[in-house]
């Protein structure tokens, strides 16, 4: 775990890109922990649990899904926590819950759609025990925005959509200078990506605020406000 503000920590992305382990956020108060996403499989989520325990963090009370993609949601079955998501995310998870997840289904899908090979091979690599896996649907759903108060800390959830997933949201930790943007400004997933699809720097630029010092995205080091400004300015040239 790495601390980036008084109450905000991150569990960084894994070093092996083929494992598709995203950055997971943790808002830690005296009484509870709120996760921003939850790991890409049960074993990844258990590693996050161990890291929280080492920090003597209180139990995870809430998980906020930034979007429905498997690498951000497959770990939630490990936690006994409330789950919050936007309406579009909840709809996508309803469909995901109907899938008979496991090697047989994934290999069949690869044969039917070779463009899914990279994603499905990653799932086969990271999930050790498919009997553990369960798609956890949200307990609380919002449409455009939601404010969550956690022991005096305010979280502002905002649906933003974007090229990567139409259900993407951001999570601002108000007063802590941190905005979780996850994958919202990334190009679409590989199997949906066209040659002209690129990182949407204009979207990230629109999300900039003077009060934000850290922009935490889903697959890489958190960006400082200066780094975001520089990247957006370079993209305009």
Image (spheres, rainbow, N blue to C red):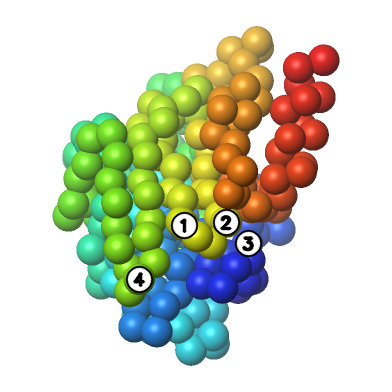
In x, y percent, where is residue 24? 51, 59
**Which of marks 3 and 2 precedes in the sequence?**
3
Q: Which mark is residue 92?
A: none
In x, y percent, where is residue 114? 51, 24
- Residue under the point 29% across and 40% down: 145
- Residue under the point 47% across and 25% down: 162
Callout 1 secondary element = strand
Q: Residue 177 carries which label?
A: 2
Image quadrant in which you'd find residue 200: top right
Above or below — where is 6 with respect to 23? below
**Quadrant housing the N terminus:** bottom right
Which residue, given by chain and number where applicable, does mark 1 sit on? 173
Badge 3 crowding class, 10 Å Cα cut-off, few under 14, some 14 to 19, many 20 or more, is: some
**Which of marks 3 and 1 precedes in the sequence?**
3
Which residue, given by chain and number where applicable, does mark 4 sit on? 152
CA separation in Å, label 2 and label 1: 7 Å
Which residue, given by chain and number where applicable, does mark 3 sit on? 12
Q: Nearer the viewer, residue 172 or 14?
A: 172
**Which of marks 4 and 2 precedes in the sequence?**
4
Left or right of 124 in this view: 88: left
CA separation in Å, label 2 and label 3: 18 Å
- Residue under the point 53% across and 49% down: 179
Callout 2 secondary element = loop
Callout 3 secondary element = loop
**Which of marks 3 and 4 precedes in the sequence?**
3
Left or right of 115 in this view: 91: left
CA separation in Å, label 4 and label 3: 26 Å
Q: Can residue 190 be seen in this view?
A: no
CA separation in Å, label 1 and label 3: 18 Å
Q: Nearer the viewer, mark 1 or mark 4?
A: 4
CB-based contact (under 8 Å), mark 2 and mark 4: no
């Amino acid at each position: 775990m790495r601390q980036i503000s008084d109450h905000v920590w991150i569990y960084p992305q894994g070093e092996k890109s083929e494992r598709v382990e995203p950055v997971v956020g943790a808002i830690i108060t005296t009484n509870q922990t709120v996760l921003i996403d939850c790991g890409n499989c049960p074993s990844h989520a258990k590693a996050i649990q161990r890291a929280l325990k080492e920090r003597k963090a209180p139990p995870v009370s809430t998980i906020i899904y930034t979007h429905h993609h498997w690498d951000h949601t497959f770990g939630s079955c490990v936690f006994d926590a409330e789950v919050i998501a936007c309406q579009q995310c909840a709809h996508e998870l309803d469909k995901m819950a109907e899938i008979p997840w496991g090697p047989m289904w994934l290999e069949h899908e690869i044969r039917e759609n070779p463009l899914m090979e990279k994603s499905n091979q990653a799932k086969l690599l990271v999930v050790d025990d498919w009997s553990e896996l369960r798609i956890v649907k949200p307990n609380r759903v919002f449409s455009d925005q939601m404010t969550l108060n956690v022991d005096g800390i305010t979280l502002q959830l905002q649906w933003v959509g974007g090229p990567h997933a139409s259900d993407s949201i951001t999570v601002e930790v108000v007063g802590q200078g941190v905005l979780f943007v996850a994958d919202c400004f990334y190009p679409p997933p590989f199997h949906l990506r066209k040659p002209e699809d690129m990182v949407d720097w204009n979207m990230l630029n629109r999300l900039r605020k003077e009060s934000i010092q850290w922009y935490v995205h889903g697959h890489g080091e958190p960006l400082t406000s200066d780094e975001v400004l520089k990247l957006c300015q370079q993209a305009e040239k």
